[in-house]
Image (spheres, rainbow, N blue to C red):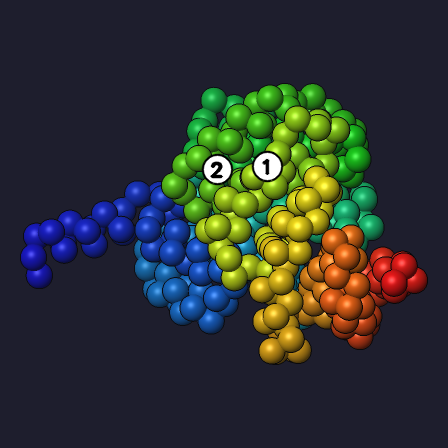
Amino acid sequence: MSLVVSLMIASAASGPWYERSTCVDAAQAVMSVDFEGARAKLAKLDRGDVEDKACAVWTRAMLAETALAVGGRQPQLLEARRKSLYAMFSFAKRYRKTPHLADLAIEARVRRVRVLLDDGERKRALDETRGAVKMLERREGANNATLDYTRGVVNMALSQSGWGMRLLLQVAGFSGDANLGRTSLERLAQGKSVYWSDAQYVRHFFTVESDAKDTNAAAMMKRLVDAFPDNPQLTYEYATDLFVAGDCPATLATVTNLNARIDSDPGLWSNDMRAKLYWLGGRCAADVGQRELAMRWAKRADAQGSKMMSDRIEDLLDQL
């Protein structure tokens, strides 16, 4: 083995888990919806050192979230997400004497708050919020990518009046700083750690949810779409940004390729995902005068049997 190759291998296997190239590769596979490839990479990480194992724990949580976005809220996928966050928390507690690994417990709590809110369990969500806030306060002055991420999410949540976590943070006594949160997420999004894509996604989420009209949500999401063109959820959100901005021709161009893929493989992704893409394409096809295409896609959207999209699909069919 040459010295150059040896140095490359040593570099890939050194440093904190979130900066390792092997971890970045696994996360990229997840974001590209290459779940089989991601699982193969995770199996290798499971056999590595403790930093590799930390990456595997974190990436499985990311895999569970992505699988839900693409595959729909199926019971087995919801359970996989629950287990992944429990595994992250348990891992952090097992390695609590190593600060940057122990910080994964804060992230697990922050991610679990949204899950509990989605399930309507506000009291448990409040308990998790209080736990996360106390843990963040104890880590004041420390810095790493995991802390940047959790501080970014928690602090930015305070600026979003419509987000359930905001009230929980206020009840938990957290005053926070939205500017600090924004800076933390921007730093991650511009970096090279595994957190960059998640940080960019969260930045986009808060931009869409905010009242600010001077930000370009589409430009933020396009960076993710360019990096992960096979991820239908990212493309749908980008197309939605274009639609909200009043650019139906660009919206239509964005969803056309994905709708063609569904035409070729009717079982691709989930019924909700297929319905969203067909509906959005049909909505904009109608706006630009392509009534025949709009009707075809509206009917195909309706055929998916998506409860979450049923009202919007019905309105589109009525218009046509």
- Residue 189's label in the rendered image is 2
Residue 267 at what x, y percent from top left? 65, 77
Could you say which is closer to the camera, residue 258 or residue 192? Answer: 258
Drawn side of residue 58 relative to residue 22, left or right? right
Alpha carbon separation for disc pair 1 and 2: 8 Å
- Circle 1: is it few (<14), some (14-19), or many (20+) Cα within 10 Å? many
Q: Which amino acid does label 1 sit on?
A: Arg
* Res 46 quadrant in image: bottom left
Q: In this view, does 267 lie to the left or right of 199?
A: right
Element on which disc 2 rests:
helix
Q: In this view, does 22 lie above or below 192?
A: below
Quadrant location, the C terminus: bottom right
Counting from the top left corner in percent of width and height, residue 117 is at: 77, 47
**Quick check: can you spot residue 237?**
no
Whether residue 16 sits left or right of residue 159 in the image: it is left
Q: Mark 1 points at which residue?
A: 203
* Residue found at x 56% / y 39%: 220
Question: Badge 2: how crowded within 10 Å, few (<14), some, or many (20+)?
Answer: many
Please name the residue shown 45% across and 27% down the image: 142
What is the three-letter code of the residue carrying label 2?
Answer: Ala
In the image, what residue occupies the spot 7% across and 57% down?
2
Q: What element carries label 1?
A: helix
**Front-lying residue, 55 or 23:** 23
